[in-house]
Amino acid sequence: MTSGPPEQTFLELEAGSEWRFELEADENIAVRVLSPDPVFINSCELPPATWYPLYRHLKSSLYAPKPARIEVAPSLPASQYTSTSTTQPQLLNLHLALERCRILARRSAGPSEGSQAGPRVMILGPPSSGKSTVVKNLVNLALGSGMGWTPGVIGLDPSSPSNLIPGTISLSTPSIPLPTHHLAQPLGSPPTSIPSNTLSADVPTVGWWLGGLEPTNRNAEVWKALVSSMAQKWKDRCEQDKLALNSGLFVDTSSAFANPLLGTKKDDPKARYTLVAQAIEAFDIDTLLVIGHEKLHIDLSRLPTVQSRNMAVIRIPKSGGVVDLDETYRETAHNFMVRTYFYGEPSLTKEMGGLMGRMVSLDSGGLHPYSFQIGWETLVVLRVGEVNAAPSSALPLGSSRTLSPTHLSRVDPSGPAHVVRLLNTVLAIVSVSAEDRIVPEKVKTEPKVAEVKTEIGDGDVKVESKGEGEGGEEQGDGAEGEGEEAEEEDMEEVPFKEEIGTREVLGFIVITGIDHQKKKYTVLSPSPGKLPSTVAIAGSIEWVDSA
Ligand SMILES: Nc1ncnc2c1ncn2[C@@H]1O[C@H](COP(=O)(O)OP(=O)(O)OP(=O)(O)O)[C@@H](O)[C@H]1O
């Protein structure tokens, strides 16, 4: 066995150059700035003379505006190079223009609506064009300007939400520059897996659950409902918090937004960039940044919504450092994001821990996920926008069924196919209050079913229907004594208003096991204790811990 102090390597960077690296699956390194002038990672300054860990799989770069000396340990990564062709000066110019808008918004005392709103910027581009990286740089430049801005960061890319599970669109309001240590935080929010249901300052990220990795024509209506709900939340926040309003917002988008036909409906076949237009209106966007793609830039400039709002559409160059991400890498990143949600950031490796000198403080390994069993009847698993009902041909002659695109259907655990589909599925927990509950007529007249009130979260009351003989255990499992017939009827019912399927989520759990005999799920929850709600939404995101 070899041991001893790790090797160290020194890099000399010339002014205006970028040191780019791609870490392999077994490469964990740390870097330290030894020269007096600042060096940045995604426009966040590396603390001087302090080790800064960079974990395996990360692909990124350090930017040195002035000549710099960097120390790398334990050794240089296999894939690394230095380049002087950087897009950082362009991003800085853009930042200065946005900064001016923010300052003008803060100074403006005019009562007219929007006069105090800072710049609202949306970034678009094809896959692997560097959208999330541009967002992160612009956010960090705003946060690092010393003006105390708190811009909104909207992740309309469910494949890389800030600090949450893939499949989510996210809203965060960071107040300090976002670090870049590993690939679990594309938009770099500080880690937390505390289920959250407010936009208060101490809760950095809130999410809405799409349950898929990108908007598609199939889920377009669900997507629109989620975006509207998120936009309303942001508006409410800005009404109460003028600093957030002045600071403006940055919207990262899915590369699916570059597809002109995304969201186009059969009844309006000529509509183009429908979801882009919806997001522009929902967040009152005033600037579009288009990375590289000339046709997309021209198409978007001609969009009626863009023209009627007299928006700025700016084409910015794609950085030569952007890496084309393949499917395997994306899968690894998604697994890593889910793991980090439950377990927190990875802790320092032995080599890093053994380095002489100061190390940046990391919030690592502080989370304690919790596994427990819950009865099939207690955890109500729903799907949004999927038809789970009988086919139209099975309906009585002459009748037809129209389901809304955000229709809820319940996953019936008594159907074996459904239960198997749920294994390893990530579920988003949604809060449900008494007003969200639809009490079916038959339940009202059914003497066997009693109403049980359960406290959720901030004192909301959830009304559950439980059969006689059901235990009052913490996670409410066990349904012995319920008649087969009554159970089947209950399973088909979705006793909630449709709107619960597209509201902000409280947190996430994963079904890690299914006991068919006892009719129970084993679930992994981010923290011990009772679930904040027993109503959960499934999507197509699965996770198996392979760490
Ligand atoms: N200048 C750079 N040097 C090194 N790596 C970079 C640079 N810019 C971006 N990257 C890396 O390239 C990869 C792709 O960039 P990014 O995720 O920003 O693109 P995207 O357009 O948002 O991707 P997606 O296809 O997921 O929408 C990321 O791993 C990012 O860290």
Image (spheres, helix red, strand yellow):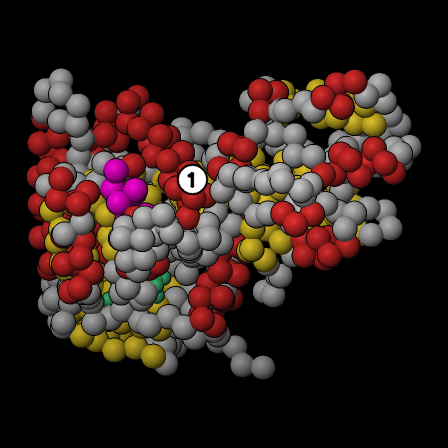
- Which quadrant of the figure contains the C terminus? bottom right
Q: Nearer the viewer, residue 400 or 485?
A: 400
Q: Nearer the viewer, residue 541 or 183?
A: 541
Q: Nearer the viewer, residue 16 or 327?
A: 327
Residue 232 is left or right of residue 69, and the answer is right
Residue 318 is left or right of residue 339, and the answer is left
Residue 233 position, x and y percent, is 37, 30
**Is residue 15 visible from the viewing direction of this image?**
yes
Q: Quadrant of residue 257?
A: bottom left
Magenta stretch: give its range: 275-281
Residue at position x 17%, y 23% in the image: 113
Residue 242 is left or right of residue 431, and the answer is left
Residue 75 position, x and y percent, is 37, 77
Q: Is residue 102 above or below residue 465?
A: below
Which amino acid, by three-letter code, is at mark 1? Leu
Residue 336 position, x and y percent, is 50, 60
Residue at position x 45%, y 43% in the image: 222
Question: How would you classify the magenta stretch by its main secondary structure?
Answer: helix
Residue denoted by label 1: 226
- Which quadrant of the figure contains the N terminus? bottom right
Q: Residues within 10 Å of mark 1 (few under 14, many from 20)?
A: many
Residue at position x 28%, y 58% in the image: 260
Mark 1 residue element: helix
The residue furthest right is: 481
